[in-house]
Amino acid sequence: MTSTVAELSIPGVPGFVMRMMRGKSKAERKSIATAQAIDALLVPDPKAQCRVDGQHVADGHYVQALTCPQKRGKPVEIARVGTYDRTGFVGQAIVTGVTPKGPMKIVLNQRASRVAD
């Protein structure tokens, strides 16, 4: 799965740093069987300790709500929405939370594809 920063607003972070982050991608690899499909791709990374608050996957569309703890402060909320087929999924994750300097928001464009069986 590849997540690309589409938009971000983080109080206290210098503008030039946010401009550098915009457009950056992070890839994550998962080995899954064909039968596991979209449900396995939507499972959060265990290291993040996120809780799935709700998830609906049907008819080529998915919606997922997550809460992820932070080292300091309140947890962040993640809302994911997108479409899928047998080859993978395309969607968006919107991360919202509060930093010591105010509310923050990060929008990630996400894409995952099956590579091989």
Image: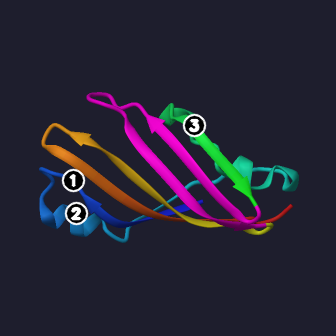
- Identify residue type, mark 1: Ile
Q: CA distance from mark 2 to mark 3?
A: 28 Å
100 drawn magenta: no
Mark 3 or mark 1, whichever is nearer to me: 3
- Asked whether, in this view, residue 74 is left or right of residue 88, the answer is left
Residue 10: which disc?
Answer: 1
Q: Amino acid at mark 3?
A: Val
Disc 3 crowd, CA 10 A, few/some/many (<14, 14-19, 20+) = some
Q: Residues within 10 Å of mark 1 (few under 14, many from 20)?
A: some
Which residue is more in the foreground, 45 or 81? 81
Asked if disc 3 and disc 1 are in contact, CB closer than 8 Å, the reply is: no
- What residue is pinned by disc 2? 18
Q: Give whichever of discs 2 and 3 has the lower sequence position.
A: 2
Regarding mark 2 in the picture, which secondary structure is present there?
Answer: helix
In the displayed structure image, the side of residue 34 where residue 66 appears, left or right: left
- Give the number of the disc on residue 101: none
Question: Going 32% across and 28% down the picture, which residue do you hit?
Answer: 71
Of 49 and 54, the residue lying toward us: 54
User: Mark 2 or mark 3, which is nearer to you?
Assistant: 3
Q: Magenta region, mostly helix, strand or loop?
A: strand
Label 3 residue SS: strand
Spot occupied by residue 19 in the image (x, y as percentages of width and height): 23, 69
Earlier residue among tags 1 and 2: 1
In the rendered view, does 15 fall on the left or right side of 40? left
Image coordinates of residue 51 in percent, x first then y, are 54, 33
The reply to whether the C-beta atoms of the residues labelled 1 and 2 are less than 8 Å apart is yes
The quadrant of the rendering that contains the N terminus is bottom right
Q: Mark 3 and mark 1: span between their CA atoms?
A: 24 Å
Of label 3 and label 1, which has the lower sequence position?
1
Residue at x 25%, y 41% (from the top left corner): 98
What's the magenta region?
59-85
